[in-house]
Image (tube, helix red, strand yellow):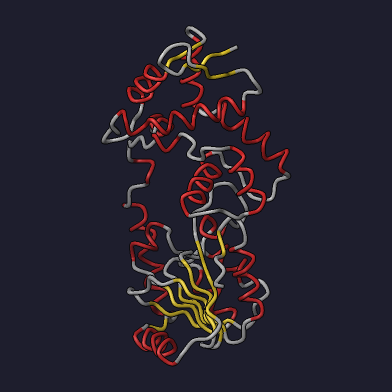
Amino acid sequence: MTKLFKNGVDLYETMFAFCEKANNLFIYVPYVKLASLESILEKAGNCKALFVRWETKDLITGASDLSIYPYCKQRGIALYRNKRIHLKAFVEDYKSCLLGSANISGRALNSPESGNYNYELATIVDSLNIEDRLYFSIIEQESILVTDDIYEQFLSQLPEKIEAFPLESDFQININSPLQDFLISSLPLTYSLNTLYRVYESKEFINDVEMNCATHDLALYKLPFGLPIDEFKQQLKAAFFSHPFIIAFLEKVGERNEIYFGEAKAWIHEHCSNVPLPRKWEITENIQILYQWLISLSDGLYEVDRPSHSERLFKR
């Protein structure tokens, strides 16, 4: 089974180990930052060539560093420029390959480690066939070897071009959206919390629907695998009751310490920020699941009964 390596989990460590043990390493990555390249190749004395895009705008915006050239020259690594480079591949002697989505940068590799990393994936192909090798050879033949003269031309013109280029801070754009927390997808999907606990502990599921609902809820409440089940339940409870959608809904319930099902449906429909809005009947199951979670996680604080024809959620 092919394994996916994930940024923020094991991508950097896998890439570092691949480079360290590789014989005759060839790297194809469009955007390369010097500090990240140094980190990846810290113990890899066998990198033969690096292929980068190095379009002028990449250097002006800082997507790639011009300073990788003297670093590569010092280490005997041939640096090639190819404006068509978009693949991200680490190739060992054209026999095996680590490929994925990550450039060589701090956020792409989560190095140094932080919470502000890109979502990236990679995998390893253990055996490249002749067509695969030919593809890399074609790229190499079409690439331009960077020389001292090419480097000096970039170096002499780059400061002036950078000065004329606007920074992101020059744009007055507010990308934060408080409505993001009021999407229908901000409500839980797993009908039974016992089902969620089972999927979490065993990583087994009955069908794809059950698995998709469970992974949605784990992602929604930012719950990683590997927690003891008691800690998992505590973190789930804290995350659920601190979610803005749940807080707002319970404030509505608190106005009379009760809410009938039709009233709850109308409130969620009114406060939902989806575009287009779902029809009211489409959110019936969402509310049923929400009630199950409130009953299960509130330790008896919330209950449901049916004093009339309509189901009522009430606070004890």
Relative to 159, residue 55 above or below: below
Q: Nearer the viewer, residue 65 or 230?
A: 230
Residue at x-position 42% and y-position 85%: 136
Residue at the spot x=40%, y=86% of the render?
Answer: 140
Of residues 92 and 144, the one nearer the viewer is 92
Which quarter of the figure has residue 185?
top left
Q: Residue at the location (56% across, 31% down)?
A: 240
157 with respect to 1 (left or right): left
Q: How many callouts does the rendering have?
A: 0
Please tell me which residue lies in front, 81 or 29. 29
Q: Observer-nearest residue: 229 or 227?
A: 229
Q: Residue furthest left?
A: 276
The image position of residue 155, as x and y in percent, is 41, 68
Kindly identify the residue that appears in the image at 46 percent across and 50 percent down.
209
Say left or right for 126 vs 270: right
Q: Quadrant of residue 168?
A: top left
Q: Quadrant of the N terminus?
A: bottom right
Residue 55, percent across and down?
34, 68
Up the image or down, 283 lies above or below 307; here it is below
Image coordinates for residue 150, horizontal then vertical, percent: 39, 77
Give residue 177's position: percent from left, percent from top.
38, 33
For the C terminus, which image quadrant?
top right
Lateral position of residue 12 relative to residue 153, left or right = right
Instruction: Relative to 234, say whether 147 is above or below.
Output: below
Residue 61 higher or lower than 294, as above or below = below
The single residue placed furthest to the top in the displayed view is: 256
